[in-house]
Image (tube, rainbow, N blue to C red):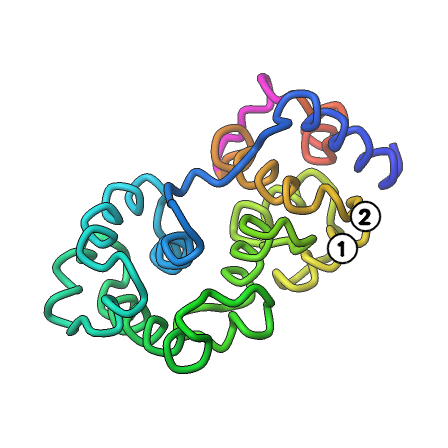
Amino acid sequence: MNKSERYQFIINYFQQHAPNAETELIYDNPFQLLVSVILSAQCTDVRVNLTTPAVFKKYPTPKKLAAATFDELFPLIKSISYPNNKTKHLIGMANMLLDKFNGEVPMTVDELIQLPGVGRKTANVITSVIDKQPNMAVDTHVFRVSARIGLTTNATTPLAAEKQLIKNIPSALIHKAHHWLILHGRYVCVARNPKCETCGIKEACKYFKKQG
C-alpha cells in the first residue's frame, strides 16, 4: 500500500466510523474554548472539563477574566498542570483580547499566536473547531499516531508533521481529521501497547505490518 492508498483507506474508515468527531473539551463559545485549550496543554481533557465550570462561572467574559488577580484565579486551576504559568497566561490573554481585539477571539492563526499561552497548536485548534478552517493541530497524539501509521515520514517536528498531513488530506476534511487522529491516539493507538487487535485501520498501518 503506497502513501496515497494509505491516506484514502484511513480517511474512508473514519468518515464511516467517526463522521461527527469533535473535541472532547466542553465549551459554549470561542472564549471558553480558548480558555480550555490553553488549560489543556500537557493536561487531559477530562481534568480540564472538571476545572473549567468554576472558571467560566466566575469569569464568563474576557473583561471579567482580565480583571482577575493571580491569587483569585490560581485556586480555581491549581489541579491543572503548570497552574502558575497558565494563571498568568489566562489573565494576559484576556487583557490582550480587550486591548487589541475588542474583546473578541480572533480567527486567524497569526493573530491568535500573539496571545499569551497560545502557540501554533492552540491557534490551529481554535480556528479549525470554531471556524472549520483547514488547519491541523499537531499535539502529541497526532504526532505519534501519524508517524506510527505511516501518514508522515521523517517528520521530526510538529510543524513538519502538520505540513505533510495538510498536503495529503482534502482541505474540507482537515478540521475533522485532527479529531480522528487525536481520538484514535487517545483510545486505540495509545503510546504504550497500542490496541492493534481492535484497530479498524491496522490493514493500512505501517507499525502493525512491521510487528508481523
Rendered image quadrant of residue 71: bottom left
Task: Inspect the magenta stretch and tell me whether residue 23 lies in it.
Answer: no
Q: Quadrant of the C terminus?
A: top right
Alpha carbon separation for disc pair 1 and 2:
6 Å
Rendered image quadrant of residue 69: bottom left
Q: Is residue 68 left or right of residue 170?
A: left
Q: What is the chief secondary structure element of the magenta stretch? A: loop
Residue at 11% over, 66% down: 72
Q: Quadrant of the N terminus?
A: top right
- Check disc 1 and give the amino acid type: Gln
**In the drawing, what numbered circle is on residue 164?**
1
Residue at 34% over, 57% down: 39
Pointer 1 and pointer 2: residues touching (CB < 8 Å)? yes
Magenta stretch: give its range.
192-199
Residue, disc 2: 168
**Residue 209, horizontal then vertical, whole percent:** 74, 29
